[in-house]
Image (cartoon, rainbow, N blue to C red):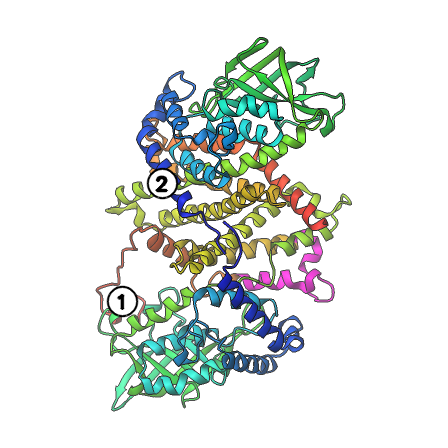
């Protein structure tokens, strides 16, 4: 048992470190998220960095070389992520496109389409989004309503999608629609990709409880998609969607989130309680700190177990599935506790006054969304119960009922 | 990164599981629960024959000279099986104390019989219904004689000797505490079993009335040694807790899959599924913390104290949670003497208190973090 790289891993890490040192745009990158650079400027920096990564093969390490990847291993991908995380570089703009959309294209698009779309996506020239969730279909994403109706060589799309990250700057999207409402819900779906600049698309930002607008609503009014942009057979949209969602779950974080328990402990040392002692000397505080520290360590070392499996060329065990189920709610709890330690001033979000430039308050306002995005806490527990522990799925009352006869469907 | 046990170590774990399945079933555990036997002597004999008691004892002293990682694998299976044997007292506490602080002569004298199972040792620390501290400790050591009462002493009725924490100074600081090895079968020692919430493990009241003892480690160095011994034991017990918690999850899962209510297996209800998912999450967090503890113990890492406290806290949380929610999953049947759920409920609490409370370990963990940040 050790934490060391194998000789091959160490050599790859050195190669990555040398490349990052020579190429990472250190100064501009520092400012992207720390000082709240505006989105257009951040996007520009991110595109430039993505192009450099792609040119060097680092943009998608595990992709085959024919698609511009490195043909590397999952452990090399982890090593690259760990090293890149040290630079606080712009990220996030290309994750959905390269992590979910393009892999779905690879499974279902024609060679000609792949030749047209993969490279620009990899180099950051074109950005993709995913159009799945709807106002009436979140956890039950197969319950979507957006209609696709055949019209000659085209399909006509009407309806609404929601929670689409980056729709306003995206060039293309993958879209799941209902093509046949007269069959049970999983059987009447059809999947497409489309140009986000198509006539009839209207994009509106969603103002979140945190005040920010990271997501959009996307409205479709008689939007035309050529049948050549259909992915998978008519009525096979659910099967194609599963390809996308599988790719979502394969993502393994390289670590390095913005606020951790170390920051909480640091805060507890700096704040003075009414007894004149640092907060960390208070027994109630100590008990909570211990819980969160241990939980954080547990997540970290669970990730290490997953990385170990990758290093040995094995498929990671199911323990990897607990990360998202734990992280979001724990973050909500310990950021709330950080504010508790600040007493009345915990309410203050002025960046010049609040400790850590009000990062605890900001994280607490984002936390409710984190517990929902990418699978709610409840859905993730269902997944652990069903796929890890082998417990039965829920009894589906909608399984054999035509979609348009389900209660709640107009 | 190789943050996992080796294939050989996993093989040892499989062998341990097979042996305990075969020789130390829950029927054996119930026999100890229902009778006056202090432990299952036939299981103990088998464990000794397999060499487990000499796992970390060097070959020069009659052991098999493996390491703490191997011992962790055995511990997980002992925890899973609830084996009613004095293993933790003799191996995690007494043997570790001797390995850490024993003189050459003491190692020569005690290690071979410990490895061979001819001697069983324990650690006598607690004295009353509150945590043992240099301030409150009263048992004295004067002119080579130990005087006072230790309570509760794990496996006090089973052990041949105890490493006893004694006061050798009048002060209340850590330097007033030393360790003395006392023959529990010799003169001046009276022992009486205590009624406890887990009768499958022995706890005893041990009275020393001028019982002869010899110092283990330097005079005044006892408290520091005890802390190290407890760190080592915390990692090993964490593996027992992880094993026990895993057994509870499996038991709850099997029951939920086979128990029907409202026309379906109760395992299909989200209230039960989420409960079992919560158990799984806590168990995995405890397992990962315990792996880190095992690494720190086996390498003698500077972070050992924090790693030990971390896995202790996580594993205590996991086993206590799994044991109580296992009963809840079983419904009314789980509250019957006949069902085995209570065996885990009892053991979970025994393990979570026998090295000091959950609260005290959390406090210790934060103290270690403070030191780290200060450095």
Q: Tell me the distance, in whole angstroms, between the alpha carbons under discs 2 and 1.
A: 51 Å
Position of residue A308 measured from the top left corner of the image (x, y, whole percent): 46, 56
Chain to which the residue tagged by mark 2 belongs = B
Q: How many marks?
A: 2
Circle 2 Cα neighbour tier, 10 Å, few/some/many (<14 / 14–19 / ≥20): some
Can see residue B347? yes
Which residue is farthest right? Answer: A276
Q: Position of residue B37 (x, y in %)?
A: 40, 17
* Residue B190, placed above or below residue B251: above
Q: Is residue A218 left or right of residue B132?
A: left
Part of the protein shown in magenta: A340-367
- Percent across and percent down for residue B251 are 34, 39
* Residue in view at x 44 percent, y 55 percent: A322
Residue B14, numbered circle:
2
Vertical side of B176 occupied by A50: above or below: below
- In the image, B277 versus B49, the foreground residue is B49
Residue named by callout 1: A406
The residue lying toward the viewer, choosing from B16 and A12, is A12
Residue at position x 37%, y 26% in the image: B46
Mark 1, secondary structure of its residue: loop
Using a 10 Å C-alpha cutoff, classify the residue at mark 1 as few (fewer than 14 neighbours), some (14 to 19) or many (20 or more): some
């Amino acid at each position: 048992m050790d934490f060391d790289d194998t000789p091959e891993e160490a050599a790859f890490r050195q190669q990555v470190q040398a490349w990052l040192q020579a190429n990472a745009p250190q100064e501009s990158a520092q400012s992207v998220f720390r000082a709240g650079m505006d989105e257009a400027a951040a996007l520009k920096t991110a595109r430039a960095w993505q192009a450099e990564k792609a040119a060097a093969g680092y943009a998608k390490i595990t992709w085959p070389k024919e698609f511009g990847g490195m043909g590397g291993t999952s452990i090399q991908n982890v090593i690259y992520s760990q090293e890149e995380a040290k630079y606080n570089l712009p990220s996030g703009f290309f994750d959905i496109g390269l992590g979910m959309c393009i892999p779905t294209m690879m499974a279902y698009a024609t060679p000609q389409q792949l030749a047209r779309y993969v490279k620009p996506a990899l180099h950051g020239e074109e950005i993709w989004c995913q159009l799945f969730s709807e106002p009436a279909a979140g956890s039950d994403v197969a319950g979507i309503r957006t209609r696709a109706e055949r019209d000659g060589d085209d399909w006509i799309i009407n309806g609404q999608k929601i929670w689409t990250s980056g729709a306003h700057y995206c060039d293309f999207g993958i879209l799941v629609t209902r093509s046949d409402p007269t069959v049970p819900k999983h059987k009447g779906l059809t999947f497409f990709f489309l140009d986000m600049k198509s006539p009839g698309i209207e994009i509106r930002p969603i103002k979140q409880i945190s005040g920010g607008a990271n997501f959009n609503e996307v409205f479709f009014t008689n939007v035309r998609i050529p049948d050549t942009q259909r992915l998978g057979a008519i009525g096979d949209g659910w099967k194609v969607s599963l390809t996308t969602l599988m790719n979502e779950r394969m993502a393994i974080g390289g670590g390095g989130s913005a606020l951790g328990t170390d920051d909480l402990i640091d805060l507890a040392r700096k704040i003075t309680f009414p007894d004149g002692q640092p907060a960390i000397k208070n027994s109630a505080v100590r008990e909570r700190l211990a819980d969160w520290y241990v939980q954080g360590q547990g997540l970290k070392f669970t990730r290490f177990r997953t990385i170990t499996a990758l290093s040995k060329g094995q498929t990671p065990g199911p323990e990897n599935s607990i990360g998202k189920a734990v992280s979001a709610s724990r973050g909500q709890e310990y950021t709330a506790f950080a504010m508790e330690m600040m007493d009345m001033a915990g309410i203050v979000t002025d960046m010049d006054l609040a400790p850590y430039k009000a990062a605890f308050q900001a994280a607490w306002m984002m936390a409710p969304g984190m517990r929902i995005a990418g699978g709610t806490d409840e859905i993730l527990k269902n997944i652990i119960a069903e796929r890890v522990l082998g417990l039965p799925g829920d009894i589906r009352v909608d399984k054999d009922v035509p979609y348009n006869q389900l209660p709640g469907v107009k | 990164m190789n943050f996992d046990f080796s294939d050989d170590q996993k093989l040892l774990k499989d062998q341990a599981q097979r042996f305990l399945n075969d020789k130390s079933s829950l029927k054996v555990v119930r026999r100890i629960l229902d009778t006056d036997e202090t432990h299952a002597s036939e299981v103990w004999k088998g464990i000794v024959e397999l060499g487990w008691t000499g796992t970390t004892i060097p070959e020069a002293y009659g052991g098999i000279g493996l390491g703490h990682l191997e011992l962790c694998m055995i511990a997980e299976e002992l925890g899973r099986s609830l084996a009613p044997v004095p293993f933790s007292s003799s191996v995690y506490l007494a043997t570790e104390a001797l390995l850490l602080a024993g003189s050459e002569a003491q190692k020569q004298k005690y290690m071979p019989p410990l490895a061979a199972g001819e001697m069983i040792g324990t650690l006598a620390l607690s004295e009353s219904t509150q945590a043992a501290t240099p301030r409150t400790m009263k048992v004295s050591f004067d002119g080579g004689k130990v005087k006072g009462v230790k309570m509760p002493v794990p496996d006090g009725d089973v052990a041949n000797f105890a490493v006893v924490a004694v006061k050798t100074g009048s002060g209340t600081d850590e330097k007033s505490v030393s360790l003395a090895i006392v023959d529990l079968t010799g003169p001046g020692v009276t022992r009486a079993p205590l009624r406890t919430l887990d009768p499958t493990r022995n706890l005893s009241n041990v009275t020393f009335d001028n019982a002869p003892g010899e110092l283990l480690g330097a005079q005044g160095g006892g408290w520091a040694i005890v802390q190290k011994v407890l760190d080592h034991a915390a990692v090993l017990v964490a593996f027992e807790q992880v094993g026990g918690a895993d057994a509870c999850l499996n038991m709850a899962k099997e029951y939920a899959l086979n128990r029907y209510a409202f026309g379906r297996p109760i395992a299909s209800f989200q209230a039960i599924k989420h409960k079992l998912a919560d158990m799984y999450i806590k168990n995995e967090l405890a397992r990962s913390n315990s792996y880190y503890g095992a690494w720190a113990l086996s390498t003698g890492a500077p972070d050992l104290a924090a790693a030990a406290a971390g896995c202790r806290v996580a594993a205590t949380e996991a086993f206590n949670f799994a044991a109580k929610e296992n009963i809840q999953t079983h419904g009314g049947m789980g509250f019957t003497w006949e069902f085995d759920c209570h065996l885990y409920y009892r053991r979970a609490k025994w393990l979570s208190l026998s090295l000091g409370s959950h609260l005290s370990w959390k406090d210790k963990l934060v103290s270690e973090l403070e030191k780290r940040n200060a450095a």
